Amino acid sequence: MKIWIVILVLVLHQKVYSQISEIKDLASGAADLFSGCSASDVSAGCNCMSSCWEGGFVIIDYLADHHREILNMRNLDPCLMSLDIEMNIAYSVHYEYGIKHYYTYINYLPHLRGNIGIFSTDFRFNILTEYADIPDSYRSWELLFLLNLVPASGFKISLGTGLDYEVFTGKYYNEHYLNFQFGVFQIRDYIDLETRIAVDYSTSLLPFIEAGIKYKTRIIHFDHLYAYIAFGGIYQNYYQAHEIWGASASLAFNIH
């Protein structure tokens, strides 16, 4: 078993004493998902969506056929109908030059995903915790509906959209998702690239951006259970103003 370990601990040069408090200040002034939208705006949006879907039944029929074909291949890849449970943690360090002091950030990212053929439902908590003089945290959760365009075990492409909910403000944003997975070493290991972007359409701001890369290797291979450990790096940006770089590690299980 070969494990690639990517260690990424970058020191950030920021002018802000506490990033968590600044992120919360920005969040408090942000608009909700539907704020600033008049009745005519909503009507125009609905008309646009109706026009887009006039020819969409052809695509739906194709996806339905593709979904049935994929499910018929479960004997080749049992993960096509499965449940993923992942416990992910990221560590980063921020150095405040003005007072010459280090601040430690730990991001807890528990993750759950259900897979049925080309469709997946993804749920994740994002708990960014700053360990300064007084520990503080910024929490949100994400619910995404994904389409696995290429669900083959050796190479996977998934994209989708859903909700990003900020616990501190009680606001919802639309979040978009894109993921690539490359199987290596007889598809026992994977290189995983993932991006999440939340959008506030009323202000054109991006409340949340995340990009990550990790290498995960299989450590358990049973008939109905796989287990993986993974190491990598993660980048997060809050309100296009505060960046968090960190090293990540995770333990994941696939039940099929």
Image (spheres, rainbow, N blue to C red):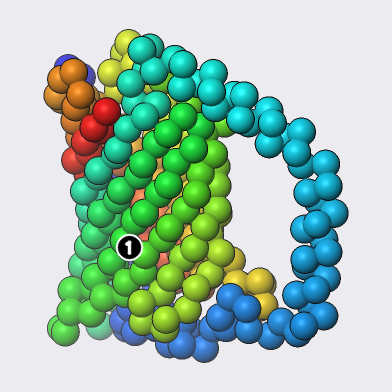
Q: Relative to 96, does residue 64 appear above or below in the rendering?
A: above
| Residue sitting at x 63%, y 31% | 63
| Residue sitting at x 15%, y 25% | 219
Q: Is residue 53 left or right of residue 7?
A: right
Of 15 and 223, the residue lying toward us? 223
Across the whole image, how many numbered discs are drawn on residues?
1
Q: Relative to 136, does residue 50 appear above or below in the rendering?
A: above
Of 144 and 129, the residue lying toward us? 144
- Which amino acid, by three-letter code, is at mark 1? Asn
Of 195 and 241, the residue lying toward us? 195
Q: SS of the residue at dot 1?
A: strand
Of 193 and 33, the residue lying toward us? 33
| Residue sitting at x 63%, y 84% | 35
Q: Is residue 154 left or right of residue 217?
A: right
Q: Quadrant of the N terminus?
A: top left
Do we see residue 97 in this rendering? no
Callout 1 crowding tier (Cα within 10 Å): few <14, some 14–19, many ≥20? many
Q: Relative to 239, does residue 83 appear above or below in the rendering?
A: above
Q: Is residue 54 left or right of residue 180?
A: right
Q: Where residue 126 sits in the image (x, y, percent)?
A: 32, 63
Q: Where residue 117 sits in the image (x, y, percent)?
A: 46, 29
Residue 114 occupies quadrant: top left
Do we see residue 60 in this rendering? yes
Q: Where residue 58 sits in the image (x, y, percent)?
A: 76, 33
Q: Quadrant of the C terminus?
A: top left
| Residue sitting at x 75%, y 38% | 57
Q: Relative to 235, does residue 225 appear above or below in the rendering?
A: above
Per the image, the residue denoted by label 1 is 126
Q: Where residue 98 sits in the image (x, y, percent)?
A: 31, 82
